[in-house]
Image (cartoon, grey):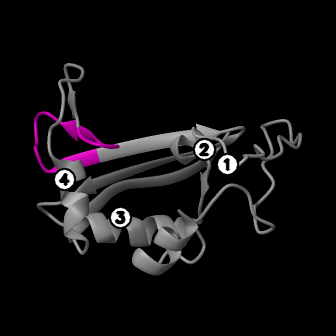
Amino acid sequence: MNEFFHNELGLKDTCLGTSNNNLKGYNRKNNDCGNWQWDKENFISPAGAVCSTADDLLKYAKINMYEDKPYLSLCHKKHGNGTKKFDMGLGWLLLKKSNHVMVHGGGTSCFSSFLGIDKKRKLLPSFWLIID
């Protein structure tokens, strides 16, 4: 997985599991939340053990927006029915009102992130790194 991030996608600050570069997280009361310690051998790790930087997330957004890696476009197609507002891609929620807007969010401990991409207008309408 790390080889894929680094060599295939060019995301040098992204890795599966934890690294020595991970920031410490703090909650609203300034208490250290720590980082989740992932066992990269655990079969579920790829679902949430990816650590990255804001810079690499923006690079990843651009790769998806401009379809620099054609195999990623398969993730942008509808693969299932979702809620009233969203359909399901592969790893992405697809806005039903606009078939070119995709979003994804995630979080661990006191870290969370959200990424929105408008592929038609080539915009990142929403990108926030929110520390709770």
Q: Which residue is mark 1?
A: 41
Residue 113 position in % (x across, y down): 53, 47
Task: Please give the range of residues in magenta.
Answer: 89-102
C-alpha distance separating marks 2 and 4: 22 Å
- Secondary structure mostly seen in the magenta stretch: loop
Q: Earlier in the sequence, mark 2 or mark 3?
A: 2
Q: Which residue is mark 3?
A: 61
Q: Nearer the viewer, mark 1 or mark 4?
A: 1
For mark 2, does the 10 Å Cα neighbourhood hold few (<14), some (14 to 19), or many (20 or more) residues? some
Foreground pick, 87 / 50: 50
Q: Amino acid at mark 4?
A: Leu
Query: Which quadrant: the C terminus?
Result: top right
Asked whether the beta carbons under mark 1 and mark 2 sit within 8 Å of each other, the answer is: yes
Would residue 110 appear left or right of 44 to someone viewing this image?
Answer: right
- Taking the spot 21% from the left edge, 26% from the top edge, the residue there is 85
Asked whether the beta carbons under mark 1 and mark 4 sit within 8 Å of each other, the answer is: no
In the rendered image, residue 91 lying in the magenta stretch gets the answer yes
Query: Disc 3 on helix, strand or loop?
Result: helix
Asked whether the beta carbons under mark 2 and mark 4 sit within 8 Å of each other, the answer is: no
Furthest-top residue in this view: 84
Residue 17 position in % (x across, y down): 68, 55
Q: Which residue is mark 2?
A: 45
Query: Disc 1 on helix, strand or loop?
Result: loop
- Taking the spot 53% from the left edge, 62% from the top edge, the residue there is 1
Q: Amino acid at mark 3?
A: Ala
Q: Amino acid at mark 1?
A: Glu
C-alpha distance separating marks 1 and 2: 7 Å
Would residue 99 appear left or right of 103 to someone viewing this image?
Answer: left
